[in-house]
Image (spheres, helix red, strand yellow):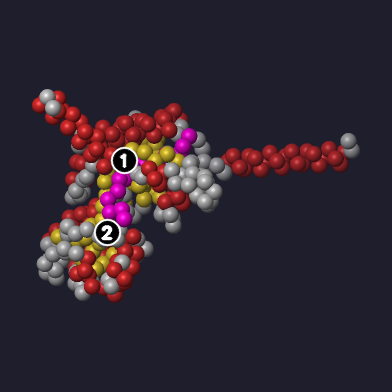
Amino acid sequence: MTSMRWLTVVVLVLFSGAVWAELVLNRPAERSYDIVIESGYLNVGVYENFPPYSFLREGEPAGVDIELGRRIAAELGVEFRVHWVVPDETLEDDLRNNVWKGHYLARTRVADVMLRVPYDKVYAYMRDSTGEVINEQVVLFGPYQQEQWQIAFDPEDLDAVQTMAVFQYHPIGVEIDTLPDTYLTSAFRGRLRDQTHHYRNVSDAFGAMVAGDVSAVMGMRAEIDYALAQRGEHGFRPASNGFPGISKQVWDVGMAVKHTHRQLGYAIEAIVDRMVRNGELAAIFDRYGLRYTMPGFYQEILNDTVNETINVTTGG
């Protein structure tokens, strides 16, 4: 082999090695259970600027999910580190960017566990047009809360909200580009569209209700409860109506880890399970002025346990 050919082979080998090294370096590090414990910290993914779940208060992380993340880390015996999740267009994007692959601008920046992920078996095993499981790179687990849609209203403008039809005549505020936004502008043949006012978030919508620009606000129950607690002096009330046309009005919220980190998921799930059962999670919600509802997953289990106890006691 001539010297020129040798040089070519050496260059190709070096180039291939450099490319491989770059691929390895540009990939999230594997942080299994043992590695997390050895490292002494846990990266907990939570959505940024999302009160009352996760937000900054006087420059420090606060919220239900922040407190939950701190508790999980403490139980594991490691330091809690917040990983702020910037929401993308879809949940699949959020899971890809923050749990298993990393964002293309920051491949190595991922969370060890991500909170506030809808716990839905149908979604977990959803397949694309080719038959591939869309979420095969992640494991959805550990439901810890049941969430639902909610309206708050100003009793000076409305006596009550018994049906959505009232918003043909009274303005209602909503966070832009959310499901309530889509619902209010498209349901009932668009009859509520003209009375729907859009805001940056639920807090701003409540500000508009304080100013008298809208008579009600729609959002997730925890968001509404938190805003009601923050503005208790105004006498705003939660409504009790349903939402015709929304197929999923109540849903469980859980967590997600990379599919190769199941052992870490099992350890976290055991911690959160105890918190749900012993009332610790409900106490966290209460500190923020929020109502807490156990996930449907637990309601079924606990109801079965109660029924079994009654049957044994009564001999039924």
Main SS, magenta residues = strand
> Residue 283: x and y, percent?
19, 41
Is 257 one of the magenta-colored residues? yes
Residue 175 versus residue 127: which sits nearer the camera? 127
User: Which residue is outermost to the front?
Assistant: 316
Tell me the number on the disc at residue 219: 2
For label 2, count other residues whose C-alpha is less than 10 Å away and answer few (under 14), some (14-19) or many (20+): many
Q: Is residue 73 magenta?
A: no
Q: Quadrant of the C terminus?
A: top left
Tell me the CA gap for discs 2 and 1. 21 Å
Residue under label 1, please give it: 143
Q: Tag 2, which secondary structure? A: strand
- Position of the N terminus by quadrant: top right
User: What residue appears at the point 45 percent right and 39 percent down from the top-left corner?
Assistant: 258
Compare residues 53 and 132 and report the one nearer the observer: 132
- Name the residue located 30 percent from the left edge and 58 percent from the top edge: 246
Give the extent of the magenta segment.
Answer: 247-260
Picture layout, residue 95 above or below residue 173: above
Specify the amino acid type for callout 2: Gly
